[in-house]
Amino acid sequence: EVIDIRELGKQGYFTYDPGFVSTASCTSKITFIDGKNGVLLYRGYPIDQLATKCDYLQVCYLLFKGELPTKEQYQEFVHRVKHHTLVHTQMESLFQAFRRDSHPMAVLCGVAGALSAFYHDKLDIYDPEHRELTAVRLIAKMPTLAAMSYKYSIGHPFVYPRNDLSYTANFLHMMFSTPCEEYKVNPIVEKALDRIFTLHADHEQNASTSSVRLAGSSGANPYACIAAGVASLWGPAHGGANEACLRMLEEIGSVDRIPEYIARAKDKNDPFRLFGFGHRVYKTFDPRAIVMRDTCHEVLDALHIDNNPLLKIATELEKIALNDEYFVTRHLYPNVDFYSGIILNAIGIPTSMFTVIFALARTIGWITHWNEMHTNEDFRIGRPRQVYTGKEKRDVKPFRSRN
Ligand code: ACO
């Protein structure tokens, strides 16, 4: 049920809602979540159907344009995206300014924001065509920037995009080809990664999307707003959970150590939490986690990876947590990040790139929300209020008499 309090706001009332647990900041036609029943729809289509029946670029088209593309529309869209995969050659020097061993998310945060310097003067954010071009540029360039961030972090030369490959195969090529050897893309790996992109494409007003909307609400350059999204996503309570979850599974190391970590997660004096568990909106299984778990089994089978120790620990951890009163009473279930790391690990993606991949995939969600915000009739600059708890009014004493 929605209570519209705009009239009360004009009379000077406002709500106190830390963490925006029960505050809608906008209306949106993009993504629907029913957290009680574990439902996630993009533009009305269930996430499991999109993940299994469409590729990521079809899903990008759907999110931004509102409908799935026809064959012709799809071909034209793919062609358009491929036209924009290169980044300006000056970007290469920008990378050189980062510390040699920088985390790829730190680099991505900087270089995504730097796009604003390349696309600013001629950008009219009030023109729908300019907004669409911005979306196409971002979809096309994020894989290039993401792969460059990785190559830089390991001290390897950048690999340029190959437009004869699919969107996802091209990303793998830029990640793993070297001047000495062309990486052969395994179709199983390509399909699994493409599905991971789709599962991360949008999730309504989470912290990073809200950051992009709030930054954009002032009329700021959209590429700079995307950098705000990347920054927000990085935290372990949000997109950084996939990296943290895999590191946690590695640290647990064996099934017999799970009870120790379950006890730590329940201990209120220990800041440790089970990464990949719990969600602000889902109070049952995250529907993305279900597709992710199935995909995880499919990929490991197809790649003939038997007895994966991380999967064994994850499966057992899930079983124990789902039967533990602490997790049951708090409705804590596996979220999208619980199984994604195991798939990414199995297909050879380094752990430091997990959140970068999330950012790449979520860029379409961020820019679609930014675009929608600029078309909504109820759009105003975002300006939350606060409940002041500081000192009452008092007078400044002259400096010499303060002791
Ligand atoms: N492990 C242990 N306890 C947990 C966990 C967890 N993963 N998640 C929540 N809880 C507990 C809290 O301690 C709290 O207990 P209390 O009522 O006794 O104080 C209760 O469950 C409610 O948790 P909140 O922190 O109030 O829930 P909130 O909605 O603010 O947080 C969040 C949601 C951040 C996702 C949280 O569940 C968490 O930190 N999970 C681990 C990190 C993670 O996996 N993040 C990815 C989320 S999905 C995404 O962003 C793509």
Image (cartoon, rainbow, N blue to C red):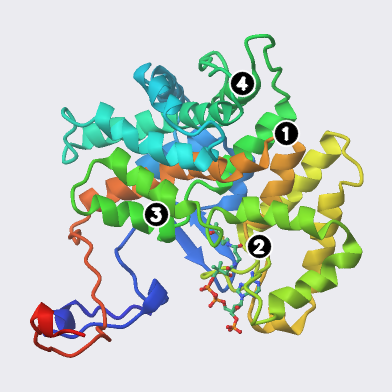
Reading the image, the residue beneath label 4 is 173
- Label 4 or label 3, whichever comes before in sequence order: 4
Q: Which residue is mark 1?
A: 348
Residue, disc 2: 275
Q: Earlier in the sequence, mark 3 or mark 2?
A: 3
Badge 3 amino acid: Thr
Which labelled disc corresponds to residue 89?
Answer: none
Mark 3 or 1, nearer chain start: 3
Which element type, helix, strand or loop, lies under badge 1?
loop
Residue appearing at x 30%, y 81% in the figure = 3
**230 to the left or right of 394:** right
| Residue under the point 78% across and 53% down | 250
**Above or below, 314 relative to 2:** above
Task: Please determine whether, in this image, residue 288 is positioned above or below residue 128.
Answer: below
Mark 2: give few (<14), some (14-19) or many (20+) Cα within 10 Å. many
Q: Are marks 4 and 1 in contact (CB under 8 Å)?
A: no
Q: Nearer the viewer, residue 290 or 342?
A: 342
Q: Amino acid at mark 4?
A: His
Along the line of sight, the residue nearer the viewer: 152 or 11: 152
Between disc 4 and disc 1, whose residue precedes?
4
Cα–Cα span, label 3 and label 1: 28 Å
Dividing the image into 4 quarters, which one contains the C terminus? bottom left
Q: Could you say whether the residue bearing mark 3 is in a helix, strand or loop?
A: helix
User: Where does the image place residue 140, in percent across and percent down from the top left?
Assistant: 43, 27
- Identify the image quadrant of residue 52: top right
User: Is the residue indicated by label 2 positioned so its CB lies within 8 Å of ligand 1?
Assistant: yes
Residue wearing tag 3: 209
